[in-house]
């Protein structure tokens, strides 16, 4: 999705080539994932000659929010508090990030 948002319109080949620069990945994997994203309504497909061009159907914040909710439902049985606790205990959080989490929790309590 990040690549399609950045390019605004992309073929499977475009996404594959961009992803291949940072990690090894199979073309068919990219094609499958783009099909899944289309099925979920995150991408729209238009035919361009022999290829299909995909465009995002929703803004980034909407898709990220839906993906996070889906992740919480699948991994944490819908309990976002379990995810928050996991993230709060993550040793990779900086002091500034921990304080930001504390502020958010305090604001929610008020």
Image: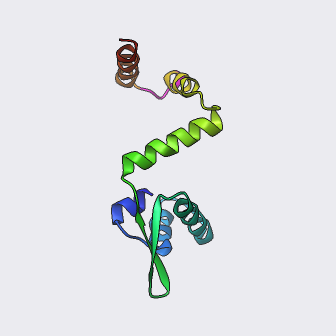
Residue 55 colored magenta?
no
Q: Position of residue 9 (x, y in %)?
A: 37, 69
Residue 10 in the image: above or below residue 99: below
Quadrant of the rendered structure where residue 57 is?
bottom left
- The front one of 44 and 102 is 44
Q: Position of residue 18 (x, y in %)?
A: 44, 66
Q: Main secondary structure of the magenta part?
A: loop
- The front one of 103 and 58 is 58
Judge from the rendering whether residue 40 lies leftward or rightward of residue 18; answer left or right.
right
Is the C terminus in the top left, top right, bottom left or bottom right quadrant? top left
Quadrant of the rendered structure where residue 94 is?
top left
Q: Residue at x 56, y 25 (%)?
A: 86
Q: Position of residue 76 (x, y in %)?
A: 63, 31
Q: Residue at x 53, y 21 (%)?
A: 89
Q: Which residues are magenta?
A: 89-93
Is the N terminus in the top left, top right, bottom left or bottom right quadrant? bottom left
Residue 90 colored magenta?
yes
Residue 41 in the image: above or below residue 88: below
Residue 69 in the image: above or below residue 103: below
Q: Residue at x 38, y 50 (%)?
A: 60
Q: Residue at x 48, y 29 (%)?
A: 92
């Amino acid at each position: 999705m990040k690549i399609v948002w950045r390019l605004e319109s992309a073929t499977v080949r475009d996404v594959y080539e961009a992803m291949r620069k940072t990690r090894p990945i199979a073309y068919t994997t990219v094609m499958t994932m783009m099909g899944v994203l289309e099925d979920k309504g995150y991408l729209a497909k238009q035919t361009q000659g022999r290829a299909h061009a995909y465009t995002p159907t929703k803004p980034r914040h909407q898709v990220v929010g839906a993906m996070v909710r889906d992740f919480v439902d699948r991994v944490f049985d819908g309990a976002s508090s379990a995810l928050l606790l996991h993230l709060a205990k993550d040793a990779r959080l900086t002091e500034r990030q921990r304080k930001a989490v504390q502020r958010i929790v305090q604001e929610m309590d008020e």
